[in-house]
Image: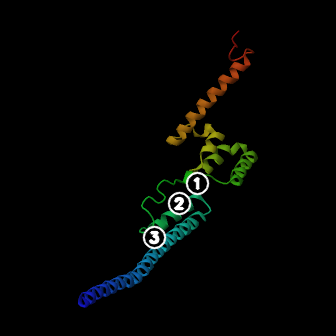
Amino acid sequence: MRLEFDEKRAQSDSERAERALLVSTLATLIPLALGVIAIVVGVINQYRQAKHQFDLKAAEIIFSGTTPQTILSRGKALKKVFSKRLSKDFLADLKVEDIGGYTEPVDAKLAFLDKIVEKPEKKAEIIQTWFLVFPGDFRWLVRFAPEQFRDTDLPEIQDLLAKLGAEKNKQLVKETSGLSGEPASRPRN
């Protein structure tokens, strides 16, 4: 009987030792695994933060340009230098027109108008010079003096002239219907 009791005791002691070993192993492995997870999450967060800071700095560099053309040029230069860090479609959808491109400051346009007022006989020459110096900034110029651009074969200008002609025709129809003394449309009785 005593032998049986000693065997049960020895078996119970070995089970306790195994449990203690398992508990001490888990007590060591769980904090170690949590530490590894914390390090991995920290590295991932640091990578994301560095990428975010890089993108912000790239945007800051790009948009510190004074003209839309400069902004796009800087963006293209950054894209070439950091081709691996910036996506392939970086600046793909951005056009100069989207950021106010091909437009000169209001002061420059006022100076242009002052020159035309000073020398109306040289209006055509002044307009042509402006168009040659600032070729992308033509929309307002065509509206200002459409007669100067009638013979131009640039499709953008021809489209704009066609729109202006349609607008002018609508305006004439409105004015003509108002001049006859009768309302443009009669109210129903």
Image height of 142 relative to 37, above or below: above
Q: Residue at x 62, y 52 (%)?
A: 103
Question: What amino acid type should be assigned to the residue bearing mark 3?
Answer: Val
Image quadrant where one finds the C terminus: top right
Left/right of residue 94 with respect to residue 184 in the rendered view: left
- Where residue 139 appears, as percent x and y from the top left, is 60, 44
Q: What residue type is disc 1 on?
A: Ile
Disc with the residue nearer the chain's start (2 vs 1) = 2
The image quadrant where one finds the N terminus is bottom left
- Inspect this view and state whether residue 151 appears: no
Question: Which one is nearer the viewer's eye here, 163 or 65?
Answer: 65
Q: Is residue 8 left or right of residue 78?
A: left
Q: Is residue 128 left or right of residue 41?
A: right
Is the Cβ of the residue at disc 2 closer than 8 Å to that at disc 1? yes
Q: Earlier in the sequence, mark 3 or mark 1?
A: 3
Q: Which mark is residue 99?
A: 1
Helix, strand or loop at mark 2: helix
Answer yes or no: is residue 132 visible. yes
For residue 72, the mark is 2
**For marks 2 and 3 on the same chain, the one whose residue lies earlier in the sequence:** 2
C-alpha span from label 2 to label 1? 9 Å
